[in-house]
Image (cartoon, grey):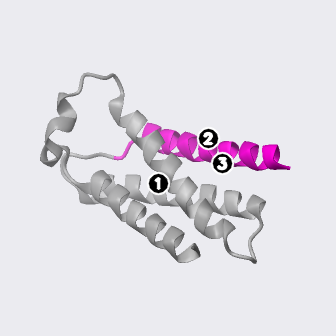
Amino acid sequence: MRSIYFWAAIAWTLFVTVLCLVSIEKLGGVNDVELPNKDKYGHFVFYFIFTLLWYAYLNFRSTVSAKHARLISISLAFIYGTFVEISQGLFTQGREADVMDIVFNTLGSITAAIGMWLIQKSKK
């Protein structure tokens, strides 16, 4: 089971990487949606799922407690999200680094961790 979570987390991480580093013009219909700050919702959801998947993988390791799995997955999401934003500014055309994207990445990650904590708390 742990292997499934690992590969799902890796696949999601690669998916997020590609979407964040590809030029927006190449994404087609995404720009047609009329929604203020639509990219911020995307960042929130991407890192919510990112955190859930990495948490699921880490939590199924017998050496990592649920609390540590949550902290590691939040930290990983923050570091990775910051790295991707810096990469956008340095290595892409038509994309730029945005501190608010990092904020929404982190909010999505923390929301996922709180949700996992509440679910675990309710099971006890």
State left or right for residue 122 relative to residue 31: right
**Main SS of residues in magenta:** helix
The residue at 44%/59% (across/down) is 83
User: Image height check: is 53 above or below 42?
Assistant: below
Secondary structure, mark 3, is helix
Which mark is first along the chain, 1 or 2? 1
**Magenta-drawn stretch contains 113:** yes
Magenta-highlighted residues: 97-124
Marks 2 and 1, how far apart in space? 15 Å
Classify 10 Å Cα crowding around label 1: few (below 14), some (14-19), many (20 and above): many
User: Image height check: is 24 above or below 41?
Assistant: below
Marks 3 and 2, how far apart in space? 5 Å
State left or right for residue 28 relative to residue 97: left
Q: From this viewpoint, is residue 99 visible? A: no
Position in image of residue 52 (x %, y %): 56, 54
In this rendering, which labeled residue sits more in front, label 2 or label 1?
2
The residue at 76%/50% (across/down) is 120
Do residues under tags 3 and 2 come within 8 Å of each other at their CB atoms?
Answer: yes
- The quadrant of the rendering that contains the N terminus is bottom right
User: Image height check: is 21 above or below 121?
Assistant: below
Position in image of residue 93 (x %, y %): 18, 51
Amino acid bearing label 2: Thr
Marks 1 and 3, how far apart in space? 16 Å
For mark 2, what is the residue?
A: 111
For mark 3, what is the residue?
A: 113
Position in image of residue 31 (x %, y %): 19, 33
For mark 1, what is the residue?
A: 81
